Image (spheres, grey):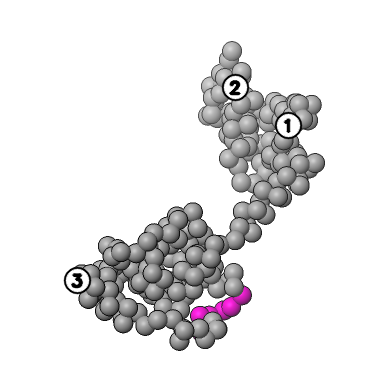
Amino acid sequence: MTERTDDAVAVPVADLRPALEAVLMVADEPLDAMALAAAVGYPAEEVAGTLSALAAEYDEQGRGFELRNVAGGWRYYTRADLAPVVEAFVLEGQQARLTQAALETLAVVAYQQPVSRARVSAIRGVNVDGVMRTLLNRGLVEEAGRDGEHGATLYRTTSYFLERIGIVALDELPDLAPHLPELDELEGELEQMAGVPATDAGVPSTPTEEASS
């Protein structure tokens, strides 16, 4: 086993194949033999031969991926005959529907923003912590600073929300806000019933929705 001693990265000969695989695995664009040679520290000719051997080996084994030399560069691709499987997986994630609870919570945020989590809970009559996490993870809702009075985190809808419902600005939303309860009145009633402010510490005596919304 020998190692190169020049300025290139010195990689033992026996490790050339896994080294190429590792670099190609993290590459976000096709890499030519010269670029890969510089990365693993071997002559471009040797790298090119190893890449061809790897591609042939993957084909022979019938792996779910293949190594292609496209547009002058090498890159991993999913195998063409498995495209329906990959497509079904990708589309399932994109088309996953929000639950009714998440839609209702999103509507409250859209019409009352910026709004605290406790206020949303007050309007809906349930604890919305799990649902809000879902909306945050989906990129539909984001933090919008703090409430100056209680210090509660405020939330608003995102530009992605506008994109998904097909409008340019919030003023294009249908006029549904008048149908929502007045938040100040709700909070006043809650404070009288519980004897404490309804802040993000939690709305008293409200059931909790499932976090899997």
171 sits left or right of 126 in the view:
right
Residue 72 shows in this picture: no
- Crowd tier of the residue under label 2, counting other residues whose Cα lies within 10 Å: few below 14, some 14–19, many 20 or above: few
Inspect the image, locate mark 2, and give the three-letter code of the amino acid beneath it: Asp
Q: Which comes sooner in the sequence, label 1 or label 2?
A: 2
Element at badge 1? Answer: loop
- Crowd tier of the residue under label 1, counting other residues whose Cα lies within 10 Å: few below 14, some 14–19, many 20 or above: few
Inspect the image, locate mark 1, and give the three-letter code of the amino acid beneath it: Arg
Residue at which label 3 appears: 195
> In percent of the image, x 70 and y 46: which residue is there?
86
Front label number (1 vs 2): 1
In the image, residue 12 sits, relative to residue 98, either above or below, namely above
Residue 21 quadrant: top right
Front label number (2 vs 3): 3
Q: In x, y percent, where is residue 136? A: 45, 61
Number of dots carrying numbers: 3
Element at badge 2? Answer: helix
The magenta-colored residue range is: 166-171
Element at badge 3? Answer: loop
> In percent of the image, x 54 and y 24: which residue is there?
10
Q: In x, y percent, where is residue 11? A: 56, 23
